[in-house]
Image (tube, rainbow, N blue to C red):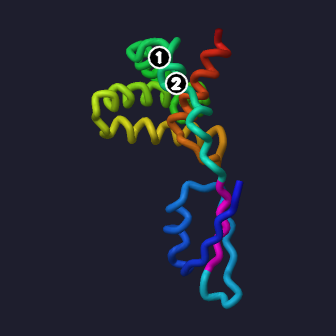
Amino acid sequence: MFEIRAICDPDDTDRVTTAFMAGDVRTYPTRDGKRTRLYLTADHRPTPQDWPTPEQAYANAPSINSEIGWTARFLAEAVCFTELGREFYLRKAALLDRIALLGESDGFHDDDGETALAAAQYLLDLDQPGVICDPRAYVRQQYARSLANDQ
């Protein structure tokens, strides 16, 4: 883990803190009071071998059609304004990742990838707020662990 220090105009604070994928940000005025000091906690990204490949993560997964059905049934049966739970968000993120992977394997990088990334980031923030890593790789890791625990 390491720390990044940035000194900026107070009006630029939001722009600076959102420019980095970092953990918590601590804000202090500079000695002269005209600028702001920002301390961002960050960590090294895990190396690629730490993550399962999509083929490894989804090797024993139900079909995409089956997961679409599960997701639709789950939402249809859920009471409005209730928390859906981690299993739903994990399976939804994995489903969207698998759909995006289909397009990416054909050379398409479109909204599917962005949607998969957003769902993966939501799960990552739900599980481990402030952790910095590849959200889609995190989903694959968690999905593979989930399947391993179910068997």
Distance of label 2 from label 1 (alpha carbons): 9 Å
Residue name at image x 32 percent, y 39 percent: 111
Residue name at image x 71 percent, y 53 percent: 1
Q: Which mark is residue 91?
A: 2
Q: Does residue 111 show up?
A: yes
What's the amino acid at mark 2?
Answer: Arg
Question: Within the magenta stretch, is there residue 61?
Answer: no
The numbered mark, 2 or 1, whose residue comes first in the sequence reads 1
Q: Front-most of 141 and 72?
A: 141
Residue name at image x 38 percent, y 37 percent: 113
Q: Is residue 69 left or right of residue 86?
A: left
Measured from the top left, where is residue 65 in percent x and y? Answer: 38, 15
How many marks overall?
A: 2
Q: Which mark is residue 25?
A: none
Q: Which residues are magenta?
A: 36-42
Q: Secondary structure at mark 2?
A: helix
Asked if residue 38 is positioned above or below residue 70 in the image, the reply reads: below
Residue contact between numbered discs 2 and 1, judged by CB atoms under 8 Å:
yes
- Residue tagged by mark 1? 70
